[in-house]
């Protein structure tokens, strides 16, 4: 995303930028109103909450959110921007939503104190592959009748990659998704003319982009995302190459053996075919394992915890913990 220094503008899809945008109450109000299908003036107050969901027990996982907001009626909303593909996104949002909901009660509190909780996922990857809808609103309902059971827990999933071609008079959530997907100052400026709350968001983007300290933080986060993508691609290519080589060698060996029994030409042909198939399978497996090990080790070196690593790359936390333990043990053996 090359931009000249004079025309530099932060992009909302970088989670650092999104978090900073949500610090502005008018921006929060405009976006939340669009999500709830209400007029912004109806949203009287939005209060930012701490973004760490404290564990209930010592060995519980600690959830870290992009932005957590409390409305005047007690509704809590978690807003998250996610650019990198996350394999366990469904598990993650259910974990956060459940923790947010149960975290409202203190010991001895009555269940009637529980208020509505909403988790909003703004994804820059395809999550629902079976349809083309860019916005899903999910809640509890009877699976046969479709009648809602309760609205106390909701999921809103916005898939930026599925945004349709721009239409005239866009409004609501789609207008905000278009803004979050913007890539240039000119795009943001044009969108700001359509809505005063998006105009406020554009003004905030300009201020953030002009702040040298904020820009350094933004670029560090952007670099971390690029490094992650590069590591994934490199590890996958290396694993495929090694797997194909091993598969071909094993296939040729099997083919020669079969050639003694069925005829050399036919055996070699079958061996090559089997080698290619096994090589691809082994390559994908090895690529995945090499990717995980290399990424985990690099992030451990940067001071990240196993849970933070799993959270960032979308892998099972227990698997990353086991891998991190092996890496630490290997380092101990070398020292």
Image (cartoon, helix red, strand yellow):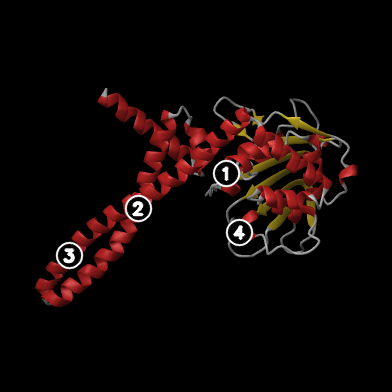
Upstream in the sequence, badge 2 or badge 3?
Answer: 2
Quadrant of residue 290 in the image? top left
Upstream in the sequence, badge 2 or badge 4?
Answer: 4
Q: Residue at x 30, y 24 (%)?
A: 332
Q: Residue at x 60, y 26 (%)?
A: 57
Upstream in the sequence, badge 2 or badge 1?
Answer: 1
The image shows residue 263, relative to residue 6, as above or below, that is: below
The residue wearing badge 4 is 128
Disc 2 to disc 3: CB gap under 8 Å: no
How far apart marks 2 and 1 lie (CA) works out to: 32 Å
Q: Residue 228: in sight, yes or no?
A: yes
The residue wearing badge 3 is 252
Image quarter (top left, top right, bottom left or bottom right) of the C terminus? top left
Helix, strand or loop at disc 2? helix
The residue wearing badge 1 is 4
The image shows residue 147, relative to residue 334, as above or below, that is: below
The image position of residue 27, as x and y in percent, is 78, 40
Q: Which label was assigned to residue 127?
A: none
Q: Is residue 295 toward the left or the right of residue 77 in the image?
A: left
Q: Which label was assigned to residue 237?
A: 2
Nearer to us in this view, 212 or 269: 212
How far apart marks 2 and 4 lie (CA) works out to: 27 Å
Upstream in the sequence, badge 3 or badge 1?
Answer: 1
Which one is closest to the eye, mark 2 or mark 1?
1
Quick one: which residue is furthest to the left in this view? 260
Give the crowd class for mark 3: few <14, some 14-19, many >=20 residues within 10 Å.
many
The image position of residue 241, as x and y in percent, is 29, 55
How far apart marks 1 and 4 lie (CA) works out to: 35 Å
Disc 3 to disc 4: CB gap under 8 Å: no
Q: Residue at x 81, y 31 (%)?
A: 110
Give the crowd class for mark 1: few <14, some 14-19, many >=20 residues within 10 Å.
few
């Amino acid at each position: 995303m090359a931009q000249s220094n004079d025309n530099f503008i932060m992009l909302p899809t970088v989670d650092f930028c999104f978090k900073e945008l949500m610090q502005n109450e008018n921006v929060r109000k405009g976006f939340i109103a669009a999500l709830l299908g209400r007029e912004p003036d109806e949203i009287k107050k939005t209060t930012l909450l701490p973004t760490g969901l404290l564990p209930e027990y010592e060995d519980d996982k600690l959830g870290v959110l992009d932005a957590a907001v409390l409305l005047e009626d007690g509704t809590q909303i978690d807003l998250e921007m996610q650019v990198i593909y996350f394999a366990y996104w469904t598990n993650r949002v259910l974990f956060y939503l459940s923790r947010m909901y149960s975290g409202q009660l203190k010991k001895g509190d009555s269940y009637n104190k529980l208020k509505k909780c909403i988790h909003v996922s703004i994804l820059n990857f395809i999550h629902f592959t079976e349809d083309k809808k860019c916005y899903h609103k999910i809640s509890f309902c009877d699976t046969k009748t479709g009648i809602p059971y309760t609205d106390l827990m909701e999921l809103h999933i916005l898939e930026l990659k599925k945004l349709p071609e721009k239409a005239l008079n866009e409004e609501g959530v789609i207008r905000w998704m278009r803004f979050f997907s913007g890539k240039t100052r000119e795009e943001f400026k044009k969108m700001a003319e359509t809505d005063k709350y998006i105009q406020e968001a554009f003004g905030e983007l300009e201020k953030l982009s002009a702040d040298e300290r904020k820009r350094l933080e933004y670029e560090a986060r952007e670099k971390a995302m690029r490094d992650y993508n590069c590591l994934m691609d490199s590890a996958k290519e290396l694993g495929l190459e090694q797997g194909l080589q091993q598969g071909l060698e094993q296939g040729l060996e099997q083919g020669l053996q079969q050639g003694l029994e069925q005829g050399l030409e036919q055996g070699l042909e079958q061996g090559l075919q089997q080698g290619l198939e096994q090589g691809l399978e082994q390559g994908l497996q090895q690529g995945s394992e090499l990717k995980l090990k290399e990424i985990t080790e690099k992030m451990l070196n940067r001071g990240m915890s196993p849970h933070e690593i799993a959270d960032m790359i979308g892998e099972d936390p227990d698997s990353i913990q086991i891998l991190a333990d092996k890496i630490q043990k290997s380092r101990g053996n070398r020292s």
